[in-house]
Every structure is written in C-alpha cells, then in structure tokens.
Amino acid sequence: MGPLQRFLEYAQDFEKTFDDDDWSRLERHFAPDAVYEVKNAPFACRLEGRAAILRGLKKSLDGFDRRLPKRALEVTEAPKEDGETVTVGWAATYRKAGAPPLVGRGRTSARYRGEVIALLVDEYPKGAGPAFAAWIRDHAPELDASYG
C-alpha cells in the first residue's frame, strides 16, 4: 500500500475518532517520534512525538470543533503523491448561530516513513491568521483551537 492509500485511511480514521473519541485508532498511523506542525494560524504549533500529537489534536477538537454545532469538510485539491509525501488541499466550514460562517482553507502534507506518518503539516495561507482570530474574538471568544 502506498502513501496515498495510507493517508486516506488515516483521514477516515480521523473522522471516526472525531465522532467517537477513540484516539487509540489513530496511534497506528504515527511514528513514535512523529512531528505535527500547524503553520500560519493563531494556534500554530509544533508537537513532537505520537503521544503529544494525539493529545494536541484532541485538545483542539475538544476546544473548538466539537463545541460548534456544524463542521463541514471539503477537499479543494485532489491528493497528490510525491515519493513518500501526500499533499491535499481542503476547506473547513464552521457554523455558529448568529455568526457568519468561518471558512478555513489550507493544505495538509503527510510524509511517511514506511507505514507511518513521520511529519504531518497543516498549513494555512499566509495572512489567514488575523481573520481567524477576529472571528473567534467577535463570535466565539469562549473557544480555544490551540493544540498545547
């Protein structure tokens, strides 16, 4: 199985975990020394190690995604495989009563080492951070999308 197929399995397992909070399902997808980076966002971070990554992902989902009534994901660029790296463009739309939709666009890259992710990067467009921060400030100051 190539990196693209492994990434698609990871993405499916991530959505199942979003629904049922079973984080053990995602362990098999990451190397013990994997790194996760979020770039160009108010919640930018660098997490090192599988356990830290899973804790950080859970914290962000619990503090933001799961506290909003609606979250819709869309693939905006077909996944591309280049050697051991898979890249996909996406948009995530969040809705909250009384607020305009928040649309976050970005690109995820996963570099594999054998069967597992060694480096996972979520990168938002440069300049997207202030608009995201303003939406939270104006419409959902009680939410926290941070990973650490």
Image: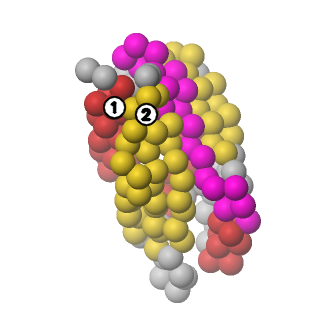
Query: Helix, strand or loop at disc 1?
Result: helix
**Rendering coords of residue 98 (x, y %):** 52, 86
- Point out the residue furthest to the bottom here: 98
Quick check: 7 above or below 97? above
**Residue 92: numbered disc:** none
> From where the camera sits, is residue 54 visible?
no
Was residue 118 drawn as part of the magenta stretch in this picture?
yes
> From where the camera sits, is residue 139 visible?
yes
Q: Identity of the amino acid at label 1?
A: Leu
Q: Say few, some or many: other residues with alpha carbon within 10 Å of mark 2 (under 14 / 14 to 19 / 20 or more).
A: many
- Point out the residue furthest to the top here: 114
**Rendering coords of residue 5 (x, y %):** 28, 30
Q: Residue at x 46, y 67 (%)?
A: 93
Q: Who is closer to the viewer here, 68 or 38? A: 38
For the N terminus, the image quarter is top left
- Point out the residue furthest to the front here: 82
Query: Helix, strand or loop at disc 2?
Result: strand
For the C terminus, the image quarter is top right
Residue under label 2, please give it: 86
Residue under label 1, please give it: 4
Q: Residue at x 57, y 37 (%)?
A: 121
**Rendering coords of residue 32 (x, y %):** 51, 16
The answer to whether marks 1 and 2 mark residues whose Cβ atoms lie closer than 8 Å is yes
Was residue 102 drawn as part of the magenta stretch in this picture?
no
